[in-house]
Image (tube, helix red, strand yellow):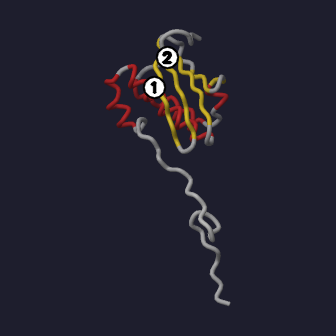
Amino acid sequence: MTTDGEYYYGVGRRKTAAAQVRLYPGGEGAVIVNGQPMERFFDRSRDRQAVVGPLVVAGLGSYTVTAVVHGGGITGQAGAVSQGLARALVRLNPDLRAALRRGGYLTRDPREKERKKPGLKRARKAPQYTKR
C-alpha cells in the first residue's frame, strides 16, 4: 500500500460523525478506515456499499483510500466517509461533480438528534394526560 506522496483530501460529515479522507492515486483499490480494512470496520454490506458508492459512480477502482473517522454511530460514519471520498474525487477531477451530485454524495445530511425539552419525556413526547 502506497500512502506516501501526493494525495487528494476531503472532509465528510453526517449527523455527529466526521471523516477525514485521503485518496492516493495508483493504489491497489484498498479502503482503510481507522487503520483497519473497510470490511472489518463496517460489518453491514449497506455501509460498505455507501462507502465505495462514489468510486462506483466515478468508475475508478485503482485508488487507495484511507479514512480517519470519529463520532456518531457506524452508519453515520459510513455516510461521513462516503461524503469525504466524494469531495476528494471532485478535487481529483472536477468533471465528476455533476455525477456525484446526482448520486447525492456531495450533499451533507443535516439531520441531527433533537434536544430534549423540559417537561417532556423526549424531544416531543409529552407525559400521558390524566383527567383525574
Q: Amino acid at mark 1?
A: Leu
Label 1 secondary element: helix
Which residue is drawn at the image coordinates 51% and 38% (left, top)? 13
Quadrant of the drawing holding the N terminus: top right
Task: Using residue 29 as the reference point, say whether residue 108 is left or right of it.
Answer: left
N-terminal-most mark, 2 or 1: 1
Which residue is drawn at the image coordinates 47% and 19% (left, top)? 61
Q: Which residue is mark 1?
A: 55
Q: Nearer the viewer, residue 52 or 23?
A: 23
Label 2 secondary element: strand
Q: Amino acid at mark 2?
A: Tyr
Marker disc for residue 63: 2
Q: Farthest residue toward the front? A: 118
Quadrant of the drawing holding the C terminus: bottom right
Asked if 118 appears above or below 19 in the picture, the reply is below
Which residue is drawn at the image coordinates 61% and 26% (left, top)? 33
Separation of disc 2 and disc 1 at Cα? 9 Å
How far across and how far down the image is residue 59, in percent? 41, 22
Marker disc for residue 26: none
How far across and how far down the image is residue 79, in percent? 52, 38
Badge count: 2
Which residue is drawn at the image coordinates 62% and 42% (left, top)? 73
Tell me the crowding category of disc 2: few under 14, some 14 to 19, or many 20 or more residues within 10 angstroms, Cα based: some
How far across and how far down the image is residue 34, in percent? 64, 26
